[in-house]
Amino acid sequence: MEIYYIDHGIDYLYEHQYPNGEFYCYYAPDDQMKEWCVPDSTVFPASLIAACLLQLRDSAKVKEILSLTAGFLSYQIMRGGVWNFFTKWNPLFKYSPADTDDTVFASYVLKALQVDFTDNSKLLISNRNQSGLFYTWFVLRPTINCSSNYWKIMSRELKRPLKSLLFWFKHESNRNDIDSVVNANILFYFGLNDQTKAVVNYLLEIVEKNKESESDKWYKNPATFYYFLSRNYTTVKELEPAKEPIIKRIYQTARENGSFGNSAFETALAISTLANLNNRDEQMNKAVNFLLKAQCKYGCWERHLFFYSGHKKTVGWGSEEIVTGYCLEALASYRRLLTEN
């Protein structure tokens, strides 16, 4: 039954990807994106959607989508193998520093597609604080580093010092931001090793103290935190203590109509999280049925903000394409769970 809905969603993404591989994205002030929406040219949506589609790459149309995405991401790469949130033709690209989240997501997608790109592992590892947690931004800091690539990337802001400085005053960002989901994504990219082990304890402490919504400036919805942490569960068994609390908190958001939270987007994240944690019961089946019924006639799901401009949530970014990517991943993950069990 899910196959029809999956194919319909793939058709939508296939028809709505730009010829250059980019996907549409908007910023808006409200979660449902109903007040107003402004188009914004960004790199991140392409990486997010491609990551969602990787387990569906047997589809000919998905292969074409991923091929275009690989070309787009390869073009957007900066020196040293890092990526910016904004595309190179977005006016804000000049002033916004490269960031860890965009870098590990694009790197993960290209690596999964076996596309060569500049090795950025040393650069990422060197971008940590004294506790071993990863900074969100690639910016100048007082540190000893002999890598020329490191200094070329970090000193980029010196080209336009005044406007680069204004970037930090205008936005809710800080040079030394440490964000939980960003660190969870780095753990997923590198796996557990000596350089990432501090991230595990950091994530477990957040779950233990129930501070999910405070732990990241950009991903303010706890469902998003649970989803990105759960991607590590299969390979990082040290995260086992977080499993039951996460499942319990997800089920606290269940509604009579079968959904989790207030949208198809949150429901999709919850389904994928539960599948990643190898948890399935009747409530999950109801959630899948809700998701199937929520699909629009064109094959998409309603847009919803995914990440925000900071703690104040002044604006956030999202689109039908991003939500559709996560709904497709949820259906594919559910189907995989049925097959494995």
Image (cartoon, rainbow, N blue to C red):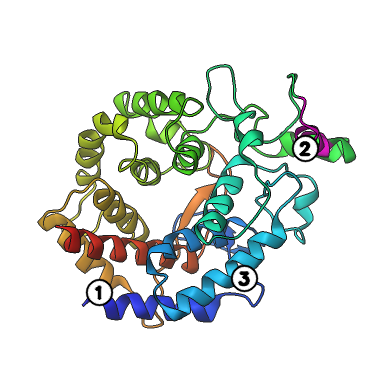
Label 3, on which residue?
21
Task: Look at the numbered discs 1 and 2 and tell me whether their residues touch, using CB distance below 8 Å.
Answer: no
For the stretch drawn in magenta, the main secondary structure is helix
Image height of 146 relative to 136, above or below: above
Task: Give the numbered dot on residue 2.
Answer: 1
Amino acid bearing label 2:
Asn
Mark 1 and mark 2 lie on one chain; the one further toward the N terminus is: 1
- Name the mark nearer the viewer: 3 or 2: 2
- Where is residue 243 shown, x and y percent of the image? 24, 36
Amino acid bearing label 1:
Glu
Mark 2 residue element: helix
- Where is residue 156 shown, x and y percent of the image? 82, 39
Label 2 packing within 10 angstroms: few (<14), some (14-19), many (20+):
some
- The residue closer to the viewer here, 266 or 43, is 43
* Residue found at the far top of this picture: 130
Label 2, on which residue?
149
- Where is residue 86 shown, x and y percent of the image? 69, 54
Mark 3 and mark 2 lie on one chain; the one further toward the N terminus is: 3
* Residue found at the far left of this picture: 282
Point out the image quarter for the C terminus: bottom left
Point out the image quarter for the N terminus: bottom left
Mark 1 residue element: helix
Image height of 101 relative to 17, above or below: above
Q: In 3D space, how far apart are the residues under numbered discs 1 and 2 (Cα atoms)?
A: 47 Å
- Name the mark nearer the viewer: 1 or 2: 2
